[in-house]
Image (cartoon, rainbow, N blue to C red):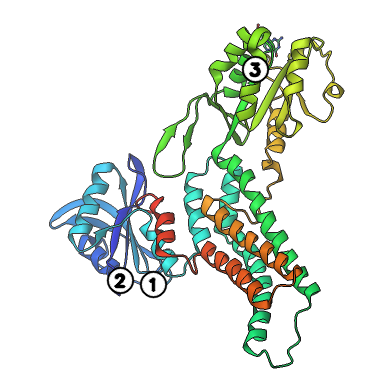
Amino acid sequence: MSKKTIAAISTPLGEGGIGVIRISGEEAILIADKVFKSVSGKTLCSFAGYSALLGHVYDGENMLDEAVATVFLAPKSYTGENVCELSCHGGRYVLSAVLRAVLKNGAVMAAPGEFTKRAFLNGKLDLVEAESVMGLISAKGEEELKLQLAAKNGRTREETDKIEALLLELSSNFAAYSDYPDEDLPELSQENFVRLCKEARTRLKKLIETYDSGRVLREGVSTAIIGKPNVGKSTLMNFLSGESRSIVTEVAGTTRDVIENTVKCGEIVLSLADTAGIRRTEDCVKSVGVNLAKERLLSAQLVLAVFDASCPLEKDDLEIIDLLKRENTVVVLNKEDKGSVLKEADFEGYKVVFLSAKEGYGKQALEAAVLEITGAARLDPDSAILLSERQLDTVTKAYDAVCEAEKLILSGYTIDAVGVCIDEALNQLYTLDGRRATNEVADEVFRRFCVGK
Ligand code: GDP
């Protein structure tokens, strides 16, 4: 094998009970034997896979740490290569020293995501599954974790396999027809063709629709809290903030930004893009307030429209209601503790929640409403889901190609022209799972990983 043996610290840098150095490649066990001496005197090379040995790690004569070495033999390992993991004490200095010793003895430093890239190249997982490994690591809540896990366990692959089978049925018919035009082959009737296209198109469309709901869980939603002065907008924000006043949100890629003014509402992170504006609205509602509210409503994915449940609706409330859209609004009837004059029926067609921000109840109902309005509630954690822009892009292209094929066949185009579209759709599915992804596409996926994964 020409590939070099790679090594990296696979656990986060910091102080912890244990820290793991992972070594992968043909010479992984040989190299590990050069730095690790077992208590029993056995060498790692003499060892069967899937076993662990207690011992010490050395840099030459210098003992660095006590460690447990775990051996996985190719192809039954994460990367599909020989792998040795040294579980040492989890300190920055210790781990760096052990890694240096490993590198000195013949391994090279792993690039970001290189272990998972090798797993992909060795057929251990496809590109969608690899992307969900990264998603699992950065999952911020239980629902997102479930979705990433479903993708990691091949749920998306199961669905794309079904779509692929439909496209292959179409494609094989074209191939047979164009290879043997003189034979009397049973031709796929237009009716059957359209039926198969329609089924593939519907499945692709459903997959595309999962993207936005999943994104809500991954990235949060831009949210506007609006309402006239004194209805309790700030109190609601504080109520939602609870212990998690500001949440660290990981932006896709390598940078980690702290986005302020975010609160967590159940599983969903709400980015309150303009918290200062909440106060400003107060000064302005009577003059230009409605314009300001309009502006904020335009850019928000989710609107929490707050009203004082204990008072009848006033002109300002009605002006605000005029601006709302049922699809993205949760009507929050606050101050329920003071008794409620307002009724759900006053907001026909809206998702309505009664709560008391001051007394601190009603949060669960609000969380459920937000889940529903954002579409996250409709996500089935056990089914296929698209989890990255790249996945969305390929599936959208496949969908467009199938739509085009359907259109052409209905307008009486030749088999050849239609076949090109079906092949394009198949090609996009192969790019999705990596069977036909270019090196650039694969590199782009793994570049986003951290070193050690
Ligand atoms: P904003 O102007 O909309 O941001 O409203 P504030 O959050 O500043 O609240 C205005 C007043 O209403 C304050 O005196 C709050 O204590 C009070 N308030 C807010 N929420 C509630 C609630 O749920 N129940 C009661 N009784 N009072 C509330």
Residue that numbered label 1 is attached to? 74
Mark nearer the viewer, 3 or 1: 3
Residue that numbered label 2 is attached to? 26
Quick one: label 2 or label 3, which is nearer the N terminus? 2
Q: Secondary structure at mark 3?
A: helix
> Looking at the image, do the residues carrying marks 2 and 3 touch, with CB atoms under 8 Å apart?
no
The number of numbered discs placed on residues in the rendered structure image is 3
Name the residue furthest left. 61
Quick one: label 2 or label 1, which is nearer the N terminus? 2
Residue that numbered label 3 is attached to? 291
Residue type for callout 1:
Ala
> Looking at the image, do the residues carrying marks 2 and 1 touch, with CB atoms under 8 Å apart?
yes
Q: Secondary structure at mark 2?
A: loop
Q: Residues within 10 Å of mark 2 (few under 14, many from 20)?
A: some
Residue at image position (38%, 70%) is 49
Could you say where residue 186 lies in the image, as x and y percent from the top left?
76, 86
Q: Can residue 308 be seen?
A: no
For residue 397, which quarter of the picture? bottom right
Quick one: label 3 or label 1, which is nearer the N terminus? 1
Name the residue furthest bottom. 183
Residue in front for this viewpoint, 98 or 110: 110
Residue type for callout 2:
Glu
Residue in front for this viewpoint, 203 or 289: 289
